[in-house]
Amino acid sequence: MDFQLTQDQADIQSAVADLCARFPEEYWQDKDAKEAYPEEFVSALQDAGWLSILIPEEYGGGGLGITEASLVLETINRSGGTAVSAHAQMYTMGTVLRHGSDEQKRRYLPKIASGELRLQAFGVTEPDAGTDTTRIRTSAVRRGDHYVVNGGKIFTSRFQHSDLMLLLVRTTPYEDVRKKTDGISTLLVDLRESRDSIGVRPIRTMQNHETNQIFFDDLVVPAENLIGEEGKGFRYILSGMNAERILVASEMLGDGFWFVAKASEYASERTVFGRPIGMNQGIQFPLAQAYAQLEAAAMLRWKAAAMFDRGLQPGFEANAAKLLASQSSWAAANAAMDTFGGYGVTVEYGIERKFREARLPLVAPVSNNLVLAYIGQNVLGMPKSY
């Protein structure tokens, strides 16, 4: 085992950091205040090839793995940016690359790699199903050479800035399957051809996440856009979700390291009662504790990424990395807020913006309680709790 970055990985980290330096705190403050999509930043990432890093070279991508993709996203957040505005294009690749047909890959991947197409929308969650994905009701009925989709999704981000959407549907009703995970299928929806059949209601949230509730009214999707086999889509999504857990954990770690760095610098410079506040153990120790927790979570994240890149499915490692990354980042956020005191709640320093970001990962993209239930039941063998 080698816990050091290779030279190529260090070069990726440096290049991404240099790109992020072109988008300072003022840029993110402006986008946050206006609830605007960071189009310039996302375009810069795409133009530099970072959003196509997982696409094989034969299709025009970087041909690298989840490890390198994790490094890109961590570096964005570690630089004070927000990778969530573009990260879906990475974690949806897991489903397409592993389960898409050769024809689908030839048709879409080169255009995604070049930036001609964006795959940023991921339609899974529904208002009445929540985390119980098997209970989704959005239906896709096969009619000849196409499917007709009706239903709706919630918390679907970046819909307005995506050309393609990975969509989870029921091709067999829940009541008609023996196993609850059967009868679920995955479709790749070309939004350029179908927006008239999709209604959108933006949802305002505590952070600039551009999320939406969407509604399908006789949406027509060619049958050739079915990913893999009909009725087997749940396992395909799980494959992509392991990638999602690893990548989102990397963003959380980036935020956590950003909090610690900003707070440590401020604590060394801010003088109260004639001495730097960083001399006080009440300031110093929480930051040191958070940093240690972040480093530990990062190690598990790297393990999960290495397993994924070897073709394995690191269910425990990916989920546990997300759990620990979210907890350590939240600890760092609180330590930073305490360090900055009243200045932490002002917009100027960026702490309050990132503080709002740091709260969400405790409950999404999967609640930490469900991660603990997964570990208790599937790893430790205890009785199923839900």
Image (cartoon, helix red, strand yellow):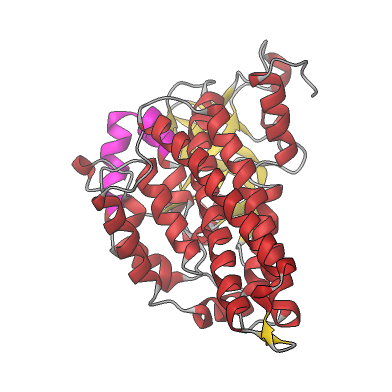
**Image position of 151 with respect to 172: above or below:** below
Q: Residue 278 location, x and y as percent?
A: 65, 74
Instruction: Identify the magenta region.
Output: 94-113
Q: Is residue 111 magenta?
A: yes
The answer to whether residue 308 is above or below residue 334 is above
Residue drawn 64% across the image and 41% down it:
323
* 233 versus 331 height, above or below: above
Q: Residue at x 43, y 60 (%)?
A: 75
Whether residue 203 can be seen here: no
266 displayed left or right of 77: right
> Toward the viewer: 264 or 333?
264
Quarter of the picture holding the C terminus: top right
Q: Residue 385: percent from the left, percent from the top?
A: 80, 23
Magenta stretch, main secondary structure class: helix
> Is any atom of residue 53 visible in this view?
yes
Residue 101 position in % (x across, y down): 33, 28
Q: Is residue 138 magenta?
A: no
The residue lying at 58 percent from left, 51 percent from top is: 292
Q: Report the front residue among 299 and 100.
A: 299
Left or right of 125 in this view: 305:
left
Q: Is residue 93 left or right of residue 64?
A: right
Residue at 58 percent of width and 65 percent of height:
260
Q: Out of 135 and 372, give the one closest to the viewer.
A: 372
The residue positioned farthest toward the right in the image shown: 385
- Report the quarter where the N terminus lies: top left
Furthest residue in direction left, as rendered = 58
Residue 111 x %, y %: 29, 51
Looking at the image, residue 50 sits to the left or right of residue 302; the answer is left
- Looking at the image, the residue that sits furthest to the bottom is 274
Tally of marks: 0
Quarter of the image where one finds residue 245 = top right
